[in-house]
Image (cartoon, grey):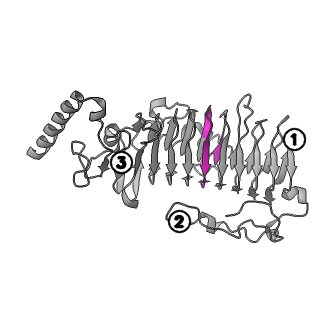
Amino acid sequence: MHVNKAIWTAAAVSAVLMTALPATEASAAPTTLVVATNGSDSAPGTLAQPLRTVQRAVDLAKAGDTIAVRAGTYALTDNITIATSGTASQPISLGAYQGERVVIDGEQLAASHTPVGGSIPRAERGAIHQEASYWRISDLEIVNGPYGVYCDGCNSNVFARLKTHDNYESGFQLQGASSNNQILNLDSYGNRDPRKNGESADGLAIKEGSGSGNVVRGARLWNNVDDGFDDWKFTSPVTVENTIAYGNGFNRWNFPDFAGDGNGFKLGGGSPAPAVAHTLRNSIAFKNAAHGVTDNGNTGALALTRNSTWANGGTGFDADVSGGKAKLTGNLSVADAKAAALGSATVSSGNSWDLGGTWNASSVLSTDPAPLTGARGADGSLPSAPSFLVPRSGAAVGARF
């Protein structure tokens, strides 16, 4: 007890001195705050004396600081709320300590168990609820939350190598006035929403908002109850590349009155759907319940380039909205219920359906997705799958991994 008292006495004196100094002198150098399951929130947050909760570290962090979380499961009784921003030159970092496995578990959160027909209060959305900018969040596993990560009004953040699975809403949702965010090497799977019987829990949703410069790269979005990726009512262009969406839209949870949509990539929507020029390139959608890729009513100049779809329950490339201006180039559809549905204003060139012939399992080198669904590289990169859905003819159509 004497040691803790000394620590807090020193901290109190330091705080008084800091408030007495001019701002330029009071600014402390960036520090690292360590969190561990055996820590204490009255500790200084060092490696030897770590904090106990991620929230305490978030509350203490200032521009340029790093929060390093030690291995273990952090069972939340309140969601982690990030409301303080870093700066362009000094972002705040939050991630696992030296590659250790960190699980953020929202099972005990009341909002995770919202009843059928109920709504989740905005502040309670997300095991991690963020309304801040200039953060670098990486290498965390987020489960059982009322959303995994929920970011509203977020700008210039980087989210890297996250796993968001088995949450009670979308694994990752970005919305509101949010721009210049990068979502890199995300694995988001098994997310479901009992309160809506499967209507809205996606792997990754960038929806109901606006903001330029948002990029998704290297994601895998699978076995989610609704869609793999959802751009519903987002009014600014989003770029998605090198991303995989599969197995979405099936009622694995036996929900009554099932309402899951089951698209791999849903590139718009709303009543009316805004016209937005989203980009999807070098990505694959396979074995989804509905379409591989759909405009979902978006009449904007979608750019769909060198993507592959396989064995989807609906259309591989659904771009037939009236007045739609989508441009499809070099895409491949293999054994979908229908290869493509194109509107009168859709531009289609160099795609498998333009080349003609029969495109089935025997027309590609492999339909075994195992290499692509295996372990990621140490840097979070997707594994190589040099034969998956690659045409035997050598035709320059479809994605390459």
Q: Earlier in the sequence, mark 1 or mark 3?
A: 3
Q: Of 4 and 196, which appears nearest the observer?
A: 4
Q: Is disc 1 surrounded by few (<14), some (14 to 19) or many (20+) residues within 10 Å? A: some
- Going 52% across and 32% down the picture, which residue do you hit? 153
Residue 249 visible: no
Cβ atoms under marks 1 and 3 closer than 8 Å: no
Identify which amino acid the numbered label 3 is placed on.
Ile
Tag 3 secondary structure? strand
Residue 151 coordinates in the image, percent (x, y): 51, 37
Identify which amino acid the numbered label 2 is placed on.
Gly
Q: Earlier in the sequence, mark 2 or mark 1?
A: 1
Distance between mark 1 and mark 3 Cα atoms? 50 Å
Residue 199 coordinates in the image, percent (x, y): 63, 39
Tag 1 secondary structure? loop
Q: Is-magenta flag for residue 211?
A: yes
Q: Of 391 and 123, which appears nearest the observer?
A: 391
Q: Quadrant of the N terminus?
A: top left
Q: Which residue is mark 2?
A: 377
Q: Relative to residue 395, is residue 114 drawn left or right?
A: left
Q: Quadrant of residue 135?
A: top left
Q: Which residue is mark 1?
A: 343
- Going 80% across and 63% down the picture, which residue do you hit? 396
Q: Is disc 3 surrounded by few (<14), some (14 to 19) or many (20+) residues within 10 Å? A: many
Q: Of 64 and 110, which appears nearest the observer?
A: 64
Placement of 364 over or under 259, stated as above or below: below
Distance between mark 3 and mark 2 Cα atoms? 24 Å
Distance between mark 2 and mark 1 Cα atoms? 40 Å
Q: Relative to residue 19, is residue 111 drawn left or right?
A: right
Q: Which residue is mark 3?
A: 67
Q: Is disc 2 surrounded by few (<14), some (14 to 19) or many (20+) residues within 10 Å? A: few
What label does residue 254 carry, if any? Answer: none
User: In this picture, which residue range is highlighted in magenta?
Assistant: 206-231
